[in-house]
């Protein structure tokens, strides 16, 4: 089967620290014998065309010099649009070039199916295509189109699709509240069990870098943007630190709030206990999970209404057998779906978050209980193999539907 993937992000180079969700799905589809073609935005660190691990990748260059392309990578499109006038200028340019190049790509490769990842603007060039397509909604495009009064366009893209999928029932609920009318189903993002698992080696150097002797390590992995709630994590850790001096907090990720968070750490006199380590490559990330004792990400509903629509980092931590703490917002309860898998706290509540962190720090048996249950849960429900099989079932439905129509 020829599958054209139209996406907002795809790894620019080996071990790119940017999220690799679409890459992992493509990799699994290739394993199962399908031909994969990818259309993605260009970045100055990437080639415009390459064949990588069996996928034919076409990247759309939309600004000169290429180093000034600011739309999709880094903090992501919704956050990037708020940083300066440049992304506003680039969005219509990219949309036009994408429309032309994807249309030409469809004529050239004649795909059986088109799979759109990130409904807007990636869905624009295929919404009136004669080729059947499905859409996976990640969430950021929902909050962005609401902000700019473009919900009607995204809804039309979904309405014209064979099927549209959200990542979680939490995201579906939000979309209904916003007035989206299209039929929606849910398929989550997965994890690569060969990459994230309890048997990761060579992690002790990372732990030793931040922790001495019997000190414990709390890990958070996130883009440094408002909706990740990292300000609340740092404030909660300040309270934890007053009771437990043997704990370190390590935050992995980059983003527009780095300077603000660094200043908060300084103001709270936590420089020796909180480490903002920036982006790390994907080959190193599993070692950070394995080196930690607890994973915490207290995501919030931000000032623009954006929120965590699933939180793959929780799944990755659970797959590495690390107990997790999250918040009861967006799609997170679809991952930490019962009280035996981890702890959910209310958003923007440092006191409740402090209590949950101390509860796990003070009880090793409880940490192991959550870790074991969560590991079994994600192995059953969130491997990329199982996710790919769900999409392949949909692809086959489309092909059978086309045959019946002939």
Image (cartoon, grey):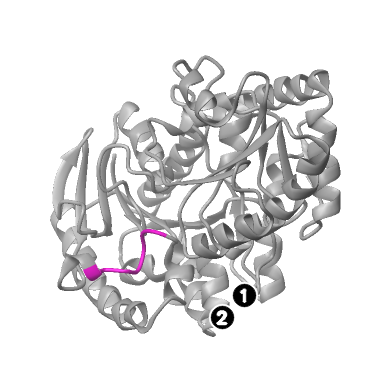
Determine if the magenta segment contains residue 60.
no
Q: Does any portion of residue 68 appear in the rendered image?
A: yes
Element marked by disc 2: helix
- The main secondary structure of the magenta stretch is loop
Crowd around label 1: few <14 · some 14–19 · many ≥20 (10 Å): few
Q: Is residue 142 left or right of residue 299?
A: left
Q: Is residue 100 left or right of residue 183?
A: left
> Which residue occupies 69% across, 65% down?
301
In this view, the residue in front, 202 or 89, is 202
Residue situated in front as seen by the camera: 399 or 157:
157
Name the secondary structure under disc 1: loop
In terms of depth relative to the viewer, which is nearer, 371 or 309? 371
User: Dot 2 corresponds to which residue?
Assistant: 147
Spatial distance from mark 2 to mark 1, Cα to Cα?
Answer: 7 Å
Which residue corresponds to the image point at 53% horizontal and 21% vertical from the top-left? 197
List x then y, in percent, for residue 329: 73, 56
Q: Quadrant of residue 91?
A: bottom left
Q: Specify which label sits upstream in the sequence, 2 or 1.
A: 2
Which residues are drawn in magenta? 68-74
Q: Is residue 244 left or right of residue 169?
A: right
Q: Is residue 188 visible?
A: no
Q: Which mark is residue 304?
A: 1
Give the x, y percent position of residue 18.
Answer: 39, 48
């Amino acid at each position: 089967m020829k599958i054209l993937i139209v996406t907002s992000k795809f790894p620019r180079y080996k071990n790119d620290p940017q999220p690799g969700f679409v890459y992992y799905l493509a990799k699994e589809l290739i394993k199962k014998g399908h031909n994969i073609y990818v259309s993605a935005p260009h970045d100055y660190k990437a080639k415009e065309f390459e064949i990588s691990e069996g996928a034919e990748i076409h990247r759309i260059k939309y600004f000169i010099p290429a180093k000034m392309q600011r739309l999709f990578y880094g903090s992501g499109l919704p956050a990037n649009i708020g940083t300066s006038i440049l992304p506003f200028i680039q969005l219509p340019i990219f949309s036009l070039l994408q429309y032309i190049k994807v249309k030409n790509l469809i004529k050239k490769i004649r795909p059986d199916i088109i799979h759109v990842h990130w409904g807007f603007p990636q869905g624009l060039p295929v919404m009136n295509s004669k080729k059947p397509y499905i859409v996976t909604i990640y969430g950021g495009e929902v909050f962005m189109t609401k902000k700019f009064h473009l919900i009607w366009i995204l809804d039309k893209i979904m309405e014209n699709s064979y099927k549209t999928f959200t990542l979680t029932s939490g995201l579906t609920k939000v979309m209904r509240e916003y007035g989206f009318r299209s039929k929606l189903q849910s398929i989550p993002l997965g994890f690569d069990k060969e990459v994230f698992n309890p048997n990761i080696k060579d992690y002790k150097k990372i732990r030793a870098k931040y922790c001495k002797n019997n000190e414990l390590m709390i890990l958070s992995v996130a883009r440094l943007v408002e909706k990740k709630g990292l300000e609340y994590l740092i404030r909660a850790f300040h309270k934890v630190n007053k009771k437990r001096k043997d704990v370190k907090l390590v935050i992995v990720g980059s983003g527009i709030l780095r300077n603000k968070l660094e200043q908060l750490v300084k103001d709270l006199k936590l420089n020796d206990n909180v480490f903002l380590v920036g982006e790390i490559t994907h080959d190193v990330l599993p070692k950070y999970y394995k080196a930690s004792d607890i994973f915490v990400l207290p995501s919030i509903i931000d000032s623009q209404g954006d929120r965590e629509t699933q939180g793959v980092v929780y799944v990755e931590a659970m797959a590495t057998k690390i107990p997790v703490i999250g918040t009861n917002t967006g799609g997170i309860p679809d991952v930490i779906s019962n009280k035996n898998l981890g702890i959910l706290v209310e958003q923007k509540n440092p006191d409740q978050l402090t209590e949950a962190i101390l509860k796990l720090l003070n009880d090793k048996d409880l940490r192991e209980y959550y870790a074991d249950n969560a590991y079994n849960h994600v192995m059953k429900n969130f491997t990329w193999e199982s996710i790919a099989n769900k999409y392949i079932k949909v692809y086959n439905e489309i092909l059978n539907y086309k045959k019946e129509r002939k």
